[in-house]
Image (cartoon, rainbow, N blue to C red):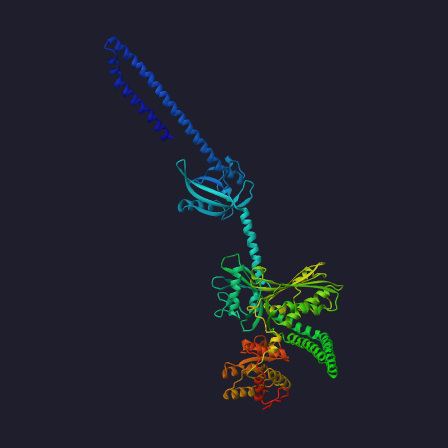
Amino acid sequence: MKDFLRSRLLLIVGGYVVLSALWIAFSDGLAAHLSNDPEVVVALNAGKVWLFVVLTAGVLYGALRRRDRAVEERHASLSARAEELQAIYDNANEAIFVHDMATARIVDCNQRACEMFRYGRDRLAACSIADLSEGIPPYDGEHARVWGKRAVEQGPHLFEWRSRRSDGACFWSEVGLRLGTIGGEVRVLAAIRDITDRKRDEEAFRRNEERSVTAFRTGPVAMLITRRSDGVCLDANEAFLAQTGYAREEVIGQTTLSDGINLWVNPDVRLSLWQELEAKKVIHGLEAEYRRKDGTVLLGLFSASLLPLGSDSRIIAVVDITVKRALEAMMLRTERLESLGVMAGGIAHDFNNLLASVFAYLDSAKESLRVRDAREAEESLSHALSVFGRARALTQQLLALAKGDAPLRRTQPVDELVRKAVVLATRGSDCEVSFASSPETWFCDVDENQIGQAIENLTLNAKQAMPRGGRLDVRVENVPSAAMPKHLPARDHVHISMRDTGNGIRGEHLSRIFDPFFATKPQGSGLRLATVASVVRKHEGCVEAESEVGTGSVFHIWLPRAPAQTQAMTLSTADVLQGRGHVLVLDDEASILNFAAAILRRSGYEVSLARNAEQAVALAELTLASGQPFRAAILDVAIPDGPGGKEIVHRLKMLDPTIKVLASSGCAGDDVMARPADFGFDGSVPKPYLVHELRAALARLFPSDQPESDSTSSSRHAFAGQDPDRPITPDPS
């Protein structure tokens, strides 16, 4: 302000000097120029003096007036600014005190300070630091002066303090001290914030943390805290130590890998656990094996989560389910034993019906042959073979149920398979069935017996849900990968849906209907839907259910589309193909060898028979040495009391890499039958043999074979040295 007034004054004086100099310099010359008369000149000189006085007075008045206005405007601006600063000062969230640096006396304070400490401004200004402090060390006047000295000597300081209001109530505050110059004087500025709520939250958090630590330490579930960056164990609770047999000092600072406590039986499970955790932030129920300190392997259910305490921490929880799984297995065996009686009665009933049908059709065929009605006899025999096929399928299902075998898959469409299973299961019932499918249903790699059993189980489940009859809608449709539900694999599938109009399933039961032994009906065993889930899972498919009580249920099966959709050779095509070459058959049962030899010789093949593996290898070596090696071999997978086809297939391939080998077994669900290529075979054919199936299996190995002339076929029969229709008993040696 002083500089502003000084500049204005200098401007006025300078202007006055300039104006006076110009007047003096030019006024005399002007008067002389106007007149030479002395009296006139005298009069002009007198007039110019007054004129100068008037002009300078006007100029000075205008200049001073302008200066006054400028001063008033400047003063108003400064006043407004001062009011603004005062408003900011008084309305700040913090209580602000201005202290004398030497005496610590309060020089000034803002309105927030009066409100916080509940004093008037004058009364507050008269208080000392001790009056505004709790008074109990370290929150007393002496320690306050120490903090002030630190601010003077070391610079700004921020610390927590216990302050006291006018009514004696104490509260937590955060105090910031720093030096500042006000009015040319160095002052100590104190900004105080009420942190009562923050301290209350901190205390609540501390207590909650103590409770969490206590829960962690004493909880019944084994828990371990590790670092995300390197997997080092940071802490473990008592349950984890008891479960693994380690002491805490043996765990802390170690990893869970082989160079540490060696927890994981399969390290790949650990890697997948961490990868899923990083993606989802929390995981539940990963089943994996882990190891105790003494080397005992246990089965656990692992869950993990990232801890909010730090970005580099995670917590792992593991529930030991070793005993639970053992009990479940025991319960499963017990349930199967309890169900065996019921199952045996059902099996006896089914087989009795099937045998009765076979005997009836054979008797009918015998009667037709007696009266020389070949057409009627052939029809009766065809019906008998059809019933025999059902009996064989039932046997294979029982074997699969007993052993839990892998599916014996064939690439085929499933729409007709589903239709037959539904029709068979609903025959004689009051259910109205509708069936719809895509025009050209995609092929799937399926075991027709297992998938048929799964469809029958779902159909029987629907029948039980509709005791008074109802409607069952079955749909089979192609679903491309782009149209698949997001929670299912993004690949082409065949979707089978079965919708009934039954009573529906309650919500609390819906999530458990595929669990073994879970049944909602008193007479239920809890295995029907569990079998469906198991079968579909073995086919890399998915099964789901949705239901509403009183409306009905819908079951969905998703089967992956076969990678290569190739039509299997039809039976009629296989029947007309004529074989060529030499075929080796290995089986320990003479009747099976006789039947296979008869079929193969009628189909144009030479046949050699073996009752054991050594004989089969010896025959292969002999024919190879003679220059007429076996073109194909049909090997029984398992031979009692000795090696079977599974053990010698590689020996045959080493002798002759061009030989084609079929696996044969009465257990269609055997792993070798399900995945013959994995064991060195080129295909498989189930026992007991049917003519068309055996021919079709060989035809798949040699699709280029064409029917040959009768003369060629006869020459082959002659070379074999035996009548194709005569039973053959191979030499046991």
Could you say which quadrant of the image residue 547 lies in? bottom right
At horizontal 37% and vertical 20% (from top left) the residue drawn is 61
Q: How many circles with numbers are drawn on the protein?
A: 0
Taking the image as drawn, is residue 538 in sight?
A: no
Nearer to us in this view, 135 or 539: 539
Residue 228: x and y in percent read 49, 61
Could you say which quadrant of the image residue 340 lies in? bottom right
Against 196, residue 670 (above or below) is: below
Against 637, residue 124 (above or below) is: above
| Quadrant of the snapshot with the N terminus | top left
Nearer to us in this view, 720 or 502: 720
Residue 49: x and y in percent read 30, 14
Residue 203: x and y in percent read 55, 52
Residue 124: x and y in percent read 50, 37
At horizontal 24% and vertical 9% (from top left) the residue drawn is 38
Nearer to us in this view, 489 or 272: 489
Could you say which quadrant of the image residue 540 lies in? bottom right
Taking the image as drawn, is residue 239 in sight?
A: yes
